[in-house]
């Protein structure tokens, strides 16, 4: 179940399934010398749901921003469908990013917010509207197309943000602690919705979280990270069939996975303390 | 609207008494203060028997306003015309300069000190030059007033165009938005609250600039704005008329401010926190 991130094994995995995203010794050092992310070797297969889990400061958001092309690795390479991330549009591949906060335009209607990426790409208005309505329906907000974001609850705003992510029919969905600010009940609901969308749309998802439960419930693979300096320490596979439902959440198997991740997280934190001493 | 909400909260079907409605109170309270002040003024003038060439009573001022309504009215129109022209010029030029500033830090670095220079140079010192250089008096005075009104538009709009949610900006970049798309779809709407704040300051300054320009242009026979009336009235020791002209200038300023507040409310009320009830 547990496997060390051995580069040779990753290369074998490459041979079997085409990787959607590859990090080849990609690392990130900020101009002031802080090492945000030690060199990472990681391959993510197409259609995979991978979670990056770790304490704050472990570089999980940095890793995600590298994949998105919002940051450039200071060394090493990053490929998406065997191309530099900025060129994936040329291969007809699309990427969507969902932020920690809803990040909506407060002056624009829900519909206009969801349509934004299509507008920016120059999609005709009518087609854009139709697709935005579709995406809103997929997250259960069809009735709220014409209201302004501020009239919605935090969970609903987050769903608008996800609809905006889905409207371009992305191949790769990057999510940076999207449900971190929500209450537990809403989070469970959205987690379940997200799994449903992932299965129907055949997306590749990279999901950043600091919640062990969310990581176990959602992913096939959990990448455990540690802080100061940010690095990948361990990798776990959650070998559970989909669809996963509320029963899985209370099952002994779920607790066992959670326990393993918890122990790993503790180990990562302990080594962190040793480093700082 | 607010009366409806208040009654639904207190579960009272009957509408609120007139003086307890917030919309009425907004006007009633300042008017009450005005009434008290005017009564005190009138009382003091009568009590100490002050001569009208020192301090005219409010009633005298009102009479001057009514008696000279034709002259004062046409002067008001002249001042108003210059104010509005200058305001419009300042808004257009100021906004364009702000657009330029946000396109590159270097442009802003190079030009911003000169915007400040424009602001800190007293208009009274510059106005005579402009009036000598520019033949057409209306144009000259408009330029003077626009110079005064320009800076708040530049500084507020630039601030607004820069106050963009960084995540939203990252989202635009992620979607390969062009500079133009960023400006039109993101920076301009984000800037509106600051922009309208600038308009409120600037509208008042345009009026002040117009009056100062008229003063500097003096009684040389051109124009005949309210400032000209004040100068004339001063020469003739017609103090009530002076006060009447002054009152008109103040009221114009208040009206401009109210108009800007109204426009701002219309544009921002649905989505921006500054225009929503704070209670």
Image (cartoon, coloured by chain):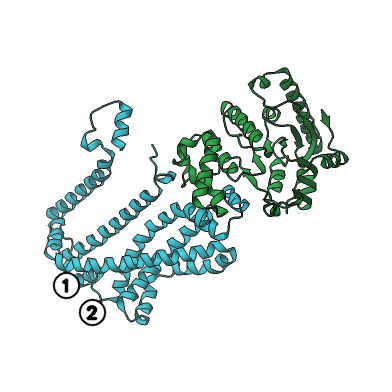
Out of B277 and B63, give the one closest to the viewer. Answer: B277
Q: Is residue A3 left or right of residue A70?
A: right
Mark 1 secondary-structure assignment: loop
Q: Position of residue A101 (x, y in %)?
A: 57, 40
Q: Position of residue A189 (x, y in %)?
A: 58, 28
Q: Position of residue A162 (x, y in %)?
A: 58, 39
Q: Which residue reaches farthest right?
A: A8
Q: Is residue A253 left or right of residue B212?
A: right
Chain that the image shows in green: A
Say whether disc 2 or disc 1 marks the residue closer to the N-terminus.
2
Residue B250 in view of the camera: yes
Residue A104 in view of the camera: no
Chain to which the residue tagged by mark 1 belongs: B
Identify the residue under disc 2. Answer: B221
Front tag of 2 and 1: 2
Q: Residue at x 23, y 79 (%)?
A: B221
Q: Residue at x 75, y 39 (%)?
A: A227
Chain to which the residue tagged by mark 2 belongs: B
Chain that the image shows in cyan: B
Identify the residue under disc 1. Answer: B236
Q: Crowding at label 2, few (<14), some or many (≥20) Cα neighbours within 10 Å?
A: few
Judge whether B100 appears above or below A100 on screen.
Answer: below
Mark 2 secondary-structure assignment: loop
Q: Are marks 2 and 1 in contact (CB under 8 Å)?
A: no
Any mark on residue A238, and which?
Answer: none
């Amino acid at each position: 179940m547990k496997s060390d991130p051995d580069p040779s094994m990753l290369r074998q995995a490459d041979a079997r399934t085409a990787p959607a995203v590859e990090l080849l010794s990609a690392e990130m050092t900020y101009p002031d010398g802080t090492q945000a992310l030690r060199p990472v070797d990681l391959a993510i297969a197409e259609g995979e749901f991978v979670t990056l889990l770790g304490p704050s400061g472990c570089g999980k958001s940095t890793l995600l921003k590298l994949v998105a092309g919002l940051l450039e690795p200071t060394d090493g390479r990053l490929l998406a469908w065997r191309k530099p991330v900025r060129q994936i549009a040329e291969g007809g591949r699309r990427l969507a990013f969902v932020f920690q906060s809803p990040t909506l335009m407060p002056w624009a209607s829900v519909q206009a917010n969801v349509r934004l990426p299509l507008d920016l790409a120059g999609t005709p208005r009518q087609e854009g509207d139709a697709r935005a309505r579709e995406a809103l329906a997929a997250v259960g907000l069809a009735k709220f197309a014409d209201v302004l974001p501020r009239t919605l609850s935090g969970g609903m705003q987050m769903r608008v943000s996800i609809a905006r992510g889905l409207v371009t029919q992305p191949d790769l969905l990057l999510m940076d602690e999207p449900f971190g600010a929500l209450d537990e009940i809403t989070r469970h609901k959205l987690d379940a919705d997200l799994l449903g969308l992932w299965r129907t749309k055949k997306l590749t998802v990279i999901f950043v979280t600091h919640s062990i439960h969310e990581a176990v419930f959602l992913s096939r693979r959990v990448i455990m990270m540690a802080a100061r300096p940010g690095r990948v320490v361990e990798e776990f596979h959650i070998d559970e069939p989909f669809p996963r439902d509320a029963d899985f959440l209370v099952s002994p198997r779920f607790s066992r996975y959670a326990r393993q991740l918890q122990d790993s997280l503790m180990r990562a934190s302990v080594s962190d303390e040793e480093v700082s001493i | 609207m607010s009366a409806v909400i208040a009654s639904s909260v207190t579960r009272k079907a009957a509408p609120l008494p007139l003086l307890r409605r917030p919309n009425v109170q907004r006007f009633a309270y300042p008017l009450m203060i005005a009434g008290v002040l005017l009564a005190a003024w009138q009382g003091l003038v009568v009590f100490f028997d002050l001569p009208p060439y020192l301090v005219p009573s409010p009633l005298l001022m009102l009479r001057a306003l009514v008696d000279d309504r034709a002259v004062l009215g046409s002067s008001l129109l002249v001042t108003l015309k210059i104010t509005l022209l200058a305001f419009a010029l300042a808004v257009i030029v100021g906004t364009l300069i702000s657009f330029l500033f946000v396109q590159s830090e270097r442009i802003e670095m190079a030009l911003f000190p000169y915007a400040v220079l424009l602001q800190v140079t007293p208009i009274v010192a510059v106005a005579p030059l402009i009036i000598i250089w520019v033949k057409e008096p209306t144009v000259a005075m408009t330029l003077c007033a626009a110079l005064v009104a320009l800076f708040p538009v530049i500084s507020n709009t630039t601030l607004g165009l820069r106050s963009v949610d960084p995540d939203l900006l990252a989202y635009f970049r992620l979607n390969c938005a062009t500079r133009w798309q960023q400006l039109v779809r993101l920076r301009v709407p984000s800037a509106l609250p600051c922009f309208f704040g600038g308009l409120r300051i600037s509208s008042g300054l345009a009026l002040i600039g117009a009056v100062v320009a008229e003063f500097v242009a003096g009684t040389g026979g051109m124009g005949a704005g309210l400032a000209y009336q004040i100068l004339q009235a001063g020469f003739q020791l017609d103090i009530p008329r002076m006060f009447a002209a002054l009152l008109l200038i103040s009221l114009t300023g208040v009206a401009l401010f109210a108009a800007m507040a109204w426009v701002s409310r219309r544009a921002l009320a649905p989505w921006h926190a500054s225009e929503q009830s704070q209670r």
